[in-house]
Image: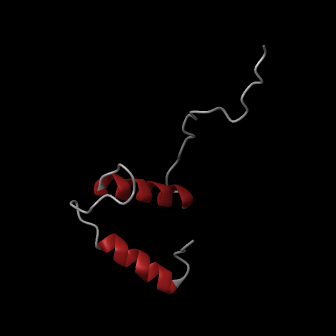
């Protein structure tokens, strides 16, 4: 995984971010370029302790109950 701690990788990541425009083709699922950048910023800020986050509800419970027949 790339890291911002590595100067070469940081430069590559910054270059990639600087080339994103509103009409950029989606390469990150269903998010628009704007949505993806907001998501990445929020994740970075939460990792830096600058933004509080809450757990998202899970589609499948972590510990499903055993089926009783």
Color scheme of the displayed model: secondary structure
For the residue pair 8 and 44, the one nearer the viewer reads as 8
Residue at the farthest left position: 23
Horizontal relation, residue 59 to residue 24: left or right: right
For the residue pair 12 and 68, the one nearer the viewer reads as 68
Please tell me which residue is depicted at 37% across the width and 55% down the height of the picture.
36
Horizontal relation, residue 66 to residue 55: left or right: right
Please tell me which residue is depicted at 52% across the width and 47% down the height of the picture.
52
Please tell me which residue is depicted at 35% across the width and 78% down the height of the picture.
15
Q: Position of residue 60 (x, y in %)?
A: 61, 33
For the residue pair 65 and 13, the one nearer the viewer reads as 65
From the image, which quarter does the N terminus lie in?
bottom right
Q: Position of residue 7 (x, y in %)?
A: 50, 85
Q: Considering only vertical position in the picture, is 48 above or below 9? A: above
Please tell me which residue is depicted at 53% across the width and 45% down the height of the picture.
53
Q: Considering only vertical position in the picture, is 51 above or below 59? A: below
From the image, which quarter does the C terminus lie in?
top right
Q: Position of residue 17 (x, y in %)?
A: 35, 70
Q: How many marks?
A: 0
Q: Position of residue 8 (x, y in %)?
A: 48, 86
Residue at the farthest front position: 69
Q: Considering only vertical position in the picture, is 61 above or below 51? A: above
Residue at the farthest bottom position: 8
């Amino acid at each position: 995984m790339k890291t911002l701690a590595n100067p070469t990788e940081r430069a590559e990541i910054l270059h990639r971010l600087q080339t994103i425009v509103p009409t950029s083709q989606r390469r990150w699922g269903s998010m628009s370029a704007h949505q993806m950048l907001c998501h990445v910023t929020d994740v970075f800020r939460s990792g830096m302790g600058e933004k509080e986050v809450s757990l998202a509800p899970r589609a499948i419970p972590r510990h499903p109950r055993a089926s009783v027949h």
